[in-house]
Structures are given as structure tokens and as C-alpha cells.
Image: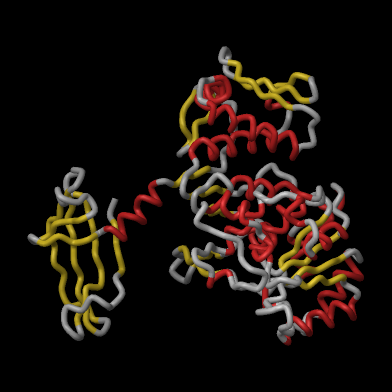
Amino acid sequence: MSIEMDIEPNEFINENVWLKLVFLRPVDDSYGQAQVQLVYQSSGIHLRSESREIRASQKNPNFIVTAGEEVDFNPIMKIMHILSDTLYIGPYRNVINSGGTNYFDTPIGQSFISSWHTWKNGAGLVTNRTVLKITRFLKEVFGFDSLEINAVLEPPSLKVFVNDEPYELNELGSGLSQLLFVLTIAAMQRPSFIMIDEPELHLHPSLQTRFLENLSSYTKRGLVFSTHSIGLARTYADFVYSVSRNERNKPHIKKFEAQPDLSLFLGEMSYSSHIDVGFDQILLVEGPTELKTMRQLLRLHGKDHKVMLLPLGGGDFINGEREHELSEIKTRILPNISALIDSEKDSDTSPLENNRQEFKAVCQRVGIKLHVLERRALENYFPDHAIQAEKGDSYRALTPFEKLKTASPSWGKWENWKIASHMSLHDLEGNDLGRFLESL
């Protein structure tokens, strides 16, 4: 593999000349040796290229020797170590097939069946518990009273017992098969990143975000997914990018900055199909991080299958200019709508900022039940035990109006939902957030 690095102009050869590009190419497929091509430029004009042979330092594997000098590649090597720990899950996700092999990073067919047998019945208690955890999740998400999945080694197959009735796995639909396969592989590998094609395949819209949420919990750093569902991307992802062709017919990636129209967004999310399976109200929340966190808290109250969450898009929507959209979804789509936003207050006596005051007034005029958190934000409701269960003993709970970014140590808002997954109903008793959730 050849690696190209575009270096920012901060390593000057002199005032006007800098090292612009570095190309690394292997030498005769031998490990630890490569050719490096250094490209220098000045004011955007290519000056010269130099080719040198490089090799790994014997003293430090993260240093590279070139022209008698050692170059510190630690920052690059850290990235490479993370990326090398990536699990790719392709669009073909069939557990049962002839033979046994790997499809990209995942075992399929006989290979997966043999692995399931070992993971469930072998001596490893960690893998035993993981199999039980996945089985419980599938039982809950599909509404079964009981579920047991056993491997049959000759001929290779999986026998599934649902509510004390035996079935072949292919009799129960592709959705169950996909969730079993993907979640098991992710749970056993626990990679830094998971990359998955079209996670919505074979799944009802009401299950798609639940699947992504559970899959994310088995990663150390995050999940990257490609999808044709704009609604799913905007509902679950922290960052959304669109891929298109440029004028030279080359792939072009850019940040997806479409301004959300709430009524259109509900159409993208197939809201009518959510109503068919029991959703009876909408809860507006600030953005994707709040959406995933609130889903965890609603689950504590047994309401995650009744309340559809809709992200507002943060400050772009929380103002006094969206009355028409709010009125439209209340009168034309569903009258039972609530909203929950952060107060962003620095103290108990601080006033709400103007945009939030205006949004509150709009909700009152339209007839939307709005709750403004008494504390600064959702993360200010997390108890010590939930934070430490996810992040470690060096972390602590925030005070009611403390900013997350000023805490030491701090964590990312994108981790809030993982912390919330460690909370219990007791943690919400006696505060305004718990009372609001109870009222939904």
C-alpha cells in the first residue's frame, strides 16, 4: 500500500519553501523498508522531489530512519494502529450458506455457526455472557417471551426456539438473522471502529436506530455507516456527509448541511410506519447527542417504543422563527408533541438566553408542551456511578450548572448516551427531568 500525506506549511525548509507531500511505497514487499518521496514547494509552485530509502528504527518501532536521521512517526502510527483495528461489515449478511469462509472481516456460514457453538458452550465465561446478552437483546427487541439459539454442527445450521417452538433461522426473517450475525461479530471483536454498509437492510424503521445504538456500544471509538436513508442519518449520526460525483466524474465528499424541515423530516423517517407499531407522540430534542441519550432514559420508563424522538438541530432551530413548521406538524401530523431543551444557564438565577425565550414563547402559542431543564444540560443529571462505569474512577458528576468542557477530566457529548445507559430509574427520582419523562 502506498501512503500519501499532505503536510501543512509549518515545517519550513526556509521562509518560503516547505515539505508539501510525502509518498511512502514498499520496497519489494519487504516489511520495514520503503521508498519515501519528498516533494517541496514554494508559494504553491512545485520545486523538486527527492527519493530516499527508509527503514524502521531498531531502537523504536515508531521511528523511521532516512538519510541517517530518525523521524518520529508516533502521531501517524497511533492513527494507523486505530485504523488497523476496524471491523468492516459488508451488505451481504447471511449467516447460513454452503461452506465456511470469511466475507471481508466477518465469518459466515459454517465458520460463524462453529464460532457460535464455541462462544455459547465453551469454557470462556466472557463469551458465554456475551452470547446471553445478545440473545436477551433479540428477545426484547422482537417481543418474544423466550428465545434460545443453538448451533447444529452436522449439517451446519442454527436451531432457534421462540416461545418454546423450534424454527430454522431462515424461517424467522432476515432481520433477526442480520442482528444476530452483526451484533455477535461486533461483540466478540470490540474494534476501535465499525464500518457498515446500509444498516437499515431488512429492518423496520422502528428498529434501525435501536440496531445502530446497540452496535455502537461494542466499539471503542465509533461507528461509520453508509445509507440511502437520509432520515436515519439525520436521526442517529453526529456527523453526516454526502457523496456525489464531481465534474471530472470523481467521488466528492462534503458535509451534509441541509436545514431540517420538520414535516419533511418526518416523511423521511417513515413516521406513518412508526404509528403502525405503537408510537403515539413526538418528543423534540436539541440534536443527535441528546436524541441518543434521551432514548436511553425513555427506555428506563418503558416508553422508548411509544415516543418518537426528533432532533431540532440545535441553535439553528431553537429560536422564534420556526412557528410555521411547529404548527404544521402539530395540526397536520400529530397533535401530541412535546419538546425538551437545555437551559444553558450558568446559575439558578440566570435568565434564559433570548433565542430560548423566543422558542418557549412559540411553543406556548402553538400548543406544544415544552420543558426547559432546570440544570444546565442533560449531562448535569448524570450521577457519579454512571459516569465512572463508562469512563473510569477518575471522572465525577458535574455540578448543576457546570459546563462539560470545563470539567477535569471531561468527556465528549457524543459519549453521553453510553453514560446514560448505566443509569437507573432511581437516578431520576426527585428531579425535573425524571418528572418530565414520567409525564410523557
Q: Is residue 74 above or below residue 13?
A: above
Q: Residue at x 55, y 48 (%)?
A: 196
Near-viewer residue (413 or 269): 413
Q: Is residue 355 above or below residue 194?
A: below
Q: Give how far across and how far down residue 183 sits, in percent.
A: 59, 38
Q: Give how far across and how far down residue 140 sits, in percent.
A: 75, 37
Q: Residue furthest left?
A: 68
Q: Give how far across and how far down residue 202 sits, in percent.
A: 69, 42
Q: Residue at x 73, y 82 (%)?
A: 349
Q: Give how far across and how far down residue 291 sits, in percent.
A: 70, 61
Q: Residue furthest top?
A: 154
Q: What is the image's colouring?
A: secondary structure
The image quadrant where one finds the C terminus is bottom right
Q: Is residue 19 left or right of residue 188?
A: left
Q: How many numbered discs sit on the rendered protein? A: 0
Res 255 seen here: yes
Res 273 seen here: no
Q: Is residue 288 above or below residue 366?
A: above
Q: Residue at x 28, y 78 (%)?
A: 9
